[in-house]
Amino acid sequence: MSKKSRQEVLIELNNYILIHGTVDNITKNKIGEKIYRYFQKNKELIEDAIEELGYELDKVKTYKTKGYYDDFNKVKILLEKFIELNNRFPIKLEIINDLGIGQRYIDKFGGMNELKRKMNYTSNDLIDLRGDFNCSIQELQVANFLCMQGLKDKYKREQHPFPKSEGRYRSDFMFDLDDNKKLHIEVWGYDTNTNSNYDEADIQKAQQLISNMDKNNLIIKSCSICGKTITVNSIDIIMCDNCKNRYNNSNTSYSLINKSKYTEIEYDNNFNILTDKSFKLTTKGFNEHSNIKIKSYIKYFNLHNWLNVIKYYNKFDDLYNYIKEEYLNFYNSTKSQNLSKFCKQHNYIVHELLLEIGTEKIMNDCGFSKQKQFSKDDLKNNFINIVKSIGYIPKYTEFANLTNIHINIYTKYFNLKGKVYDNVVKLYSTEDEFNKYISKNSQTYEINTNNMDIKEVI
């Protein structure tokens, strides 16, 4: 079988879109998966191919392939459209939620200020007295206050308050203190109603904070209950003293308050930063590395289970491919298809997660069919039918694309080792035919399919 050209794959992609109207679940369809894998193998984004065919990307693909926004030009196009439509630069929340550009891409391109510089955005709508860009009116007010207090050259913007291992968060303002200590200030530009501005009391709080800079590690945030601005020394403190006393003296369950401990953007940022490696998409892997636990995500987004959270963030394919890869690695090393045994030996994949996905689906997709036990004749006929259909003994890659029975079934049935596919060919060919295949497997063969007599094409 000759390798398909890119033009042929584009035609198949176009036909797929005409039939289905979308490519959102393209990997769940055998034809669609081959199309998707073609672009993946050639390190090409399927989104580029869709646009090349003349489709509006947002109408046929809801979520973007991981790495899509690594190209700044793609980010630039969306930002330009937003600015043209709204006559202003989007705030971070709008970039993440409305434009679909994750926090990791904002960080990749240097943060909000650097994004605006890259865009040559010079409007003074949120530029402070020092000339810095700001993400909200509240942040602008604090920045101007600091400048008017003579601290214009005393702070840095968008610095990392935590070690890289703890995430890529950036603070709004950072002061260098004595003894190599640092004071980070984070401005919350909204409260529980998302629309309150800083009042005189807020300014006094900021002024008090600056005048007592020796008190390191102070954080400004809003009470999750009343929205009042509070100064605390731990991110885990979520309520002002009045609200804490009020709820401690009432019959209200603390869990009803605790659901507001994090905002939606904090959930999103935590998830996007944490799941840079596939094993962290598992229930065990995520809980081990995240400060915000799985139960909190399920409760906050009102979803049924962790799998629904994964799908919400469009990470199911990443998780599923990771599970399949690990399962096949387990099988290749143990020759066992036992999923329970696999989970017991794995550091992160647990059986409950596989049950949610569907153990039968996983086994079928890995070539271990629960629904059908193949006979010796089934295996032979499958191979011979492939040879008949293409007219020669296929290479392994061709066999893999055409077979109805996964190579792992042959491996287990005949207890094959070493060069498994070569041994499969040997089973269904004469010694002469096999030697020709081994020595000249880059050539094609003409076959008399009645007696499997293979003749080299001159």
Image: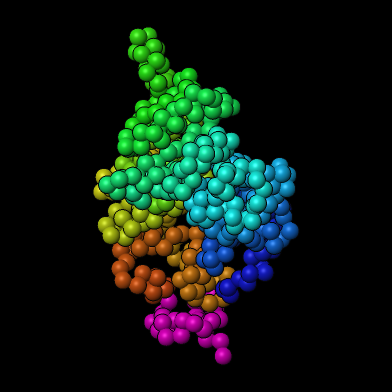
Q: Is residue 76 left or right of residue 105?
A: right
Q: Quadrant of residue 437?
A: bottom left
Say if 446 sits above or below 198 in the image: below
Residue farthest top in this picture: 250
- 95 or 204: which is nearer to us? 204
Q: Which residue is at 71% across, 44% downward? A: 87
Q: Which residue is at 46% across, 27% downward? A: 204
Residue farthest bottom in this picture: 458
Say if 51 sits above or below 5 in the image: above
Residue farthest front in this picture: 150
The C terminus sits in image quarter: bottom right
Q: Which residue is at 50% across, 63% downward? A: 403
Q: Quadrant of residue 178?
A: top left
The mark tally for this picture is 0
In this view of the protein, can residue 111 be seen by the observer? yes
Inspect the magenta stretch and tell me whether residue 313 lies in it.
no
The N terminus sits in image quarter: bottom right
In this view of the protein, can residue 27 be seen by the observer? no
- 171 or 453: which is nearer to us? 171
Inspect the magenta stretch and tell me whether residue 450 lies in it.
yes
- Across and down, in percent, residue 369 comes to 42, 51
Q: Which residue is at 49% across, 29% downward? A: 203
* Colour approach in the figure: rainbow
- Across and down, in percent, residue 457 comes to 56, 87
- Across and down, in percent, residue 79 comes to 65, 50
Q: Is residue 288 left or right of residue 31?
A: left
- Across and down, in percent, residue 261 comes to 42, 28
- 452 or 286: which is nearer to us? 286
Say if 31 sits above or below 193 in the image: below
Q: Which residues are magenta?
A: 429-458
